[in-house]
Amino acid sequence: MTDVNEALNALRAIAMSAGDTWTDTGLPRVAMVRAEACSNQVYGPMLHLVLQGSKSLSIGGQVVQFEAPGYFVVPVALPALGQVAAQSRSAPYLAVSLALDPAIIAAMLAELSDTRPVRHAAGFAVAQAGPELVDAWLRMLRLIARPHEVAMMAPLIEREILFRVLQGPHGDLLRQIAHADSRISQVRRAIDWIRAHMTQPLRVGPLAAMAGMSVAAFYRHFKAVTAMTPIQYQKSLRLLKARRLLLFEPFDAASVAYTVGYESASQFSREYARMFGLPPMRDVARFKTPDAASLGVRTRSRAGSERA
């Protein structure tokens, strides 16, 4: 097995070819990124490994921080405000991700005869990657240069990466993804509905029924998984989409407010400023000035786009 520092250096060399938004690698479910600024987006169910630099994520009322070689497990789609820190201009933030497929994890658990009761862990977690996990990631990314091996080797290495996480401190998060009756899977059904009907009024009763819970239990478990109430979750989705529209489409703030589901432009402006620190048009202006780089914002890519 390659020394962990040598493996990280080799991974960094590969990831330096990524763009400043999530870049497709040609490997199933695997992407990589080289970034210098903020990353406000909806994180789909994924395993996210930091190779260089550090990252801070604000999810609901919680803030998590991790640095290389830390990894972040997200079992459900989560809107988050992120900030990355590069080591230097020549050593940007680098990371790789693996989108999580519940069917693959379930098949692995069946083969492992893993019948342990699922403990209801929190909805996201951070841990340090051990040498075996870093080594598996290196072998995965080296397949980029050997496309003729991808069909055979990538699924095997993906399973090894998942196996290492299953054996780690947050393996229960992956187990919950694979079990249809786990709290995370139940909440995920409601999350999928909210995301698909983001602009519609939200009624908690039908969502609780969709998750197979009482309203009180649904509130409790939804917040345990996402660190947000259902209303806060919907609001975060709307505001992240609003920011993307303001940055990349010829809309004014009022038009965007109604497009993402607000009935009041003034309420939209207040909630936007509460989330991003400035009212909509003043916030967007920061991204379009020569000083944008010093403010820690990206202007070249669709900042805030979803990584699913």
Image (cartoon, rainbow, N blue to C red):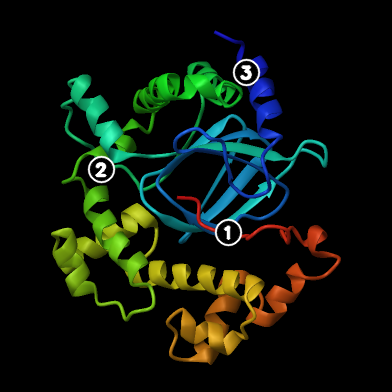
Q: Amino acid at mark 1?
A: Asn
Label 3 sits on what residue type? Ala
Q: Nearer the viewer, mark 3 or mark 2?
A: 3
Q: Is residue 4 visible?
A: yes
The residue furthest front is 148
Name the element at disc 3: helix
Name the residue furthest right.
Answer: 290
Q: Position of residue 91 (x, y in %)?
A: 77, 36
- Residue 40, labelled with which disc? 1
Query: What is the secondary structure assignment of the residue under circle 1?
Result: loop
Placement of the N terminus among the 4 image quadrants? top right
Q: Residues within 10 Å of mark 1 (few under 14, many from 20)?
A: many
- Give residue 115's position: percent from left, percent from top: 15, 26
Residue identifier under label 2: 120
Q: CA distance from mark 2 to mark 1?
A: 27 Å
Rounded to the nearest whole Å, what is the CA distance between mark 3 and mark 2? 33 Å
Q: Is residue 137 visible?
A: no
Residue 255: which quarter of the image? bottom right
Residue 119 appears left or right of 298: left
Mark closer to the chain start, 1 or 3 = 3
Q: Residue at x 24, y 49 (%)?
A: 185
- Using the rendered view, name the quadrant where residue 228 is placed: bottom left
Q: Residue at x 71, y 58 (%)?
A: 298
Identify the residue at image location x=45%, y=50%.
308
Q: Nearer the viewer, residue 136 or 146?
A: 146
Residues tagged 1 and 3 counted as in contact (Cβ below 8 A): no
Q: State the SS at label 2.
A: loop
Question: In the image, residue 151 lies at what x, y percent?
Answer: 42, 24
Vertical arrangement, residue 1 with respect to residue 254, above or below: above
